[in-house]
Image (tube, rainbow, N blue to C red):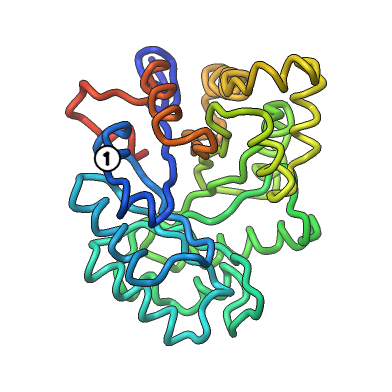
């Protein structure tokens, strides 16, 4: 029996992400993304609430599943958070979110994704799927035991929630480390399906910039050593070095909690979309988009 997570070609489905400005001002980029796909709407603190809501509505209206980032530290009050999630659900039809701590020069009263969950507002306003962050390579400012305790607290909250929870991870370049992490969190008692973050095709200079920002330099160094730093810098990054072993894991270990990919389009939406379509993670022919929403 074939694994439901894999396409007939043995490929994992994938979500991706766009900035609010991209969605609103360059909506033609959506032509490179199949309908039904989960499109995360980033919140880097440089877009207004109106633009974020408008971006989510555009995605809903065009047949996509918007997944706005809910960055806890950016809300000046619980009321501000409630206003944001109310607008997203009522004006843009949002049913899926990503709850993260986020960053801010001066944090408000909500300082973590757990704090967002504990307000109960996601359930109150009908959110059906809540993604929370996973860190296969750890987080620069969070100790490993704190990461574990937070994940287990999220499981406690999930047990009392009507929403489905998933783990969406930071990107990385070492599939062996990802496999070790999947085994580790399963040992902790993780029950959430996992969407593994990968970088889409991009120039190495671009990836170096983002890797430093995200704290995954060690994983990038692994990639450069594997391919030879000079060759890698000239040739660019081939995501298959990361994705192939993950798909092999699903085939070899059906019990793995790995469910799909989340692709960070550092090389641009068009390049990312064409790569995913060519490898058959994305299909523009099928009218059945359920596998893309896994």
Locate residue 86, reporting x and y percent.
Answer: 31, 75
The residue where tag 1 is placed is 28
Q: Which residue is drawn at 53% across and 56% down?
A: 132
The image quarter containing residue 273 is top left
**In front here: 102 or 24?**
24
Q: What element carries label 1?
A: helix
136 horizontally vs 97: left or right = right
Q: Closer to the camera, 135 or 29?
A: 29
| Label 1 packing within 10 angstroms: few (<14), some (14-19), many (20+) | few
Instruction: Out of 29 and 160, give the one closest to the viewer.
Output: 29
Numbered-mark total: 1
Q: In the picture shown, does residue 186 fall above or below 151?
A: above
Among the 4 quarters of the image, the one containing residue 63: top left
Question: Is 98 placed left or right of 7 in the picture?
Answer: right
**Residue at 70% across / 50% down in the picture?**
213
Q: Where is residue 268 in the image (x, y as percent from the top left)?
A: 47, 35
Q: In which quarter of the image is residue 17?
A: top left
Task: From the viewer's side, name the closer residue of 65 and 119.
Answer: 65
State which quarter of the image contains the N terminus: top left
> Measuring 42% from the left and 33% from the top, which residue is drawn there?
14
Residue found at x 69% / y 49%: 214
On screen, 218 above or below 68?
Answer: above
Q: Could you tell me residue 181's position as x and y percent?
A: 70, 39
Q: Can you say which quadrant of the picture contains the C terminus?
A: top left
* Above/below status of 277 relative to 172: above
């Amino acid at each position: 029996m074939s694994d439901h997570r894999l396409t007939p070609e043995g490929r994992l489905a994938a979500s991706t992400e766009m900035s609010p400005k991209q969605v609103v001002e360059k909506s033609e980029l959506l032509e490179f993304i199949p309908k039904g796909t989960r499109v995360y709407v980033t919140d880097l603190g440089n877009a207004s609430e109106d633009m974020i809501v408008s971006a989510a509505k555009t995605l809903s209206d065009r047949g996509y599943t918007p997944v706005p980032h809910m960055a806890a530290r950016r809300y000046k009050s619980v009321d501000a958070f409630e206003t944001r999630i109310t607008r997203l659900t009522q004006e843009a039809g949002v049913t899926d979110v990503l709850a993260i701590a986020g960053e801010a020069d001066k944090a408000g009263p909500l300082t973590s994704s757990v704090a967002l969950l504990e307000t109960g507002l996601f359930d109150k306003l009908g959110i059906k799927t809540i993604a929370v962050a996973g860190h296969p390579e750890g987080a620069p400012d969070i100790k490993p035991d704190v990461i574990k305790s937070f994940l287990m607290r999220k499981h406690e909250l999930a047990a009392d929630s009507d929403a489905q929870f998933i783990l969406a991870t930071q990107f990385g370049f070492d599939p062996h480390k990802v496999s070790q992490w999947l085994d580790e969190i399963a040992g902790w008692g993780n029950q959430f399906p996992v969407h593994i973050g990968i970088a889409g095709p991009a120039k190495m200079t671009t990836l170096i910039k983002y890797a430093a920002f995200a704290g995954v330099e060690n994983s990038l160094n692994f990639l450069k050593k594997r391919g030879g730093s000079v060759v890698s810098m000239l040739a660019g990054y081939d995501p298959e070095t990361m994705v192939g072993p993950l798909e092999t894991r699903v085939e070899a270990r059906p019990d793995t909690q790995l469910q799909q990919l989340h692709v960070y389009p550092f090389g641009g939406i068009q390049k990312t979309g064409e790569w995913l379509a060519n490898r058959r993670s994305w299909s523009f022919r099928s009218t059945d988009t359920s596998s893309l929403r896994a």
